[in-house]
Amino acid sequence: IIKTSICRPAAAAAFSIVPKSLTHLVPGKFEALTMSSSSTTDNNAPSRKDLIRKLLKGIETGDPDSAAVVNEAKYIQHNPQTKEGGEGLAALFARISKSNPHVNVVRAFEDGDFVFGHTEYDFATRRVGFEIFRFEGNQAVEHWDNIQPRMGPNESGHSMVDGPTESSDLELTETNRALVKDFIDQVYLQRKVETLDQYVAADDFINHSPSVEDGIEALKKYLGGSIEYKTNHRVLAEGNFALTVNEGYRDGVHTSFFDMFRVAGGKIVEHWDTVEAVPLKSEWKNQNGKFSNL
């Protein structure tokens, strides 16, 4: 059984939902954000998105049932900072919850066998992350994430998590996925910044990145800086939202870039991201790889 242990003082490295960076658990305050009522299937069974919301919230509530969605016998962890082996998730969540952590699932989407979420964590410090789970049947069997300190608001007044939370235009999922994939390939990977206006709504582009303000010119300046995207590993999509998993370098440091986009009228109109350095392989707590199997 693949479980996760806490092997550092006051650290909550479990499941990598509570990664190495979220240590010394203390309460804090969240920005006021609410989710709409959970979606369910026709027979009123919880959807995969509902199950992941419950799982993530279980870190806060200590609800032992929240961990039932995870098939711990098959579970593959791709957070390189998380050590595998140790106590079960239900027992771990019950213990962590006594330290009064706070978890807010801002957004959750579903794409085939994948559920991807946009989350806030408040432990010793506030963090923002993207979580990806792969399902087999009704259980999660694989997990990737990308988490960074919460920063901002940026110069345009946006936080890293505000903005629309529900998807629409479900019939355009594949069209929007293709648009975002081509955008990443042409603009971020091939650095054809001159093509930006083919993909981005120049007059309406909203950016939640803490270091980049709204507008296409600010994005051009950012792309001309010290970041270098090398590989796009996957584009997940539901309706008008798409999450891209990318690998590259920032200031020469091996880095993971998770970028989420909202599309409207055939153009990208909004962007959220998290940026996290990839640990040296000699420092990995497991050997599953940050991007493997995507």
Image: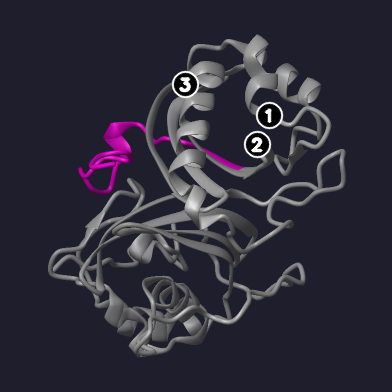
Q: Which is more foreground, mark 3 or mark 2? A: 2
97 above or below 225? below
User: Which quarter of the image is occupied by the N terminus?
Assistant: bottom left
Q: Is residue 252 visible?
A: no
For image coordinates 87% across by 41% down, the residue present is 156
Tell me the amino acid under the disc marked 1.
Answer: Val
Q: Which residue does the numbered mark 1 point to in the structure image?
A: 200
> From where the camera sits, is residue 272 visible?
yes
Determine whether the residue tagged by mark 3 lies in a helix, strand or loop: helix
- Tags 2 and 1 in contact by the CB under 8 Å rule? yes
- First in sequence: mark 3 vs mark 2: 3
Q: Nearer the viewer, mark 3 or mark 1?
A: 1
Mark sitting on residue 185: 3
Query: Reading the chain from its start, which is encountered first: label 3 or label 1?
Result: 3
Q: Tell which residue pokes out farthest to the front in this image.
A: 171
Residue 181's label in the rendered image is: none
Instruction: Estimate the x, y position of residue 208 in percent, counting from the top left.
Output: 72, 44
Between the C-alphas of marks 3 and 1, the distance is: 14 Å
Query: The magenta stretch spans which residues?
Result: 273-294
Q: Which is nearer the eye, 75 or 126?
A: 75
Q: Quadrant of the C terminus?
A: top left
Q: Secondary structure at mark 1?
A: loop
Query: In the rendered structure, which amino acid carries the disc numbered 3?
Result: Asp
Is residue 264 rendered to the left or right of residue 156?
A: left
Q: Is residue 175 left or right of residue 163?
A: left
Q: Which residue is mark 2?
A: 268
Q: Secondary structure at mark 2?
A: strand
Instruction: Give the Cα distance between marks 3 and 2.
Output: 14 Å
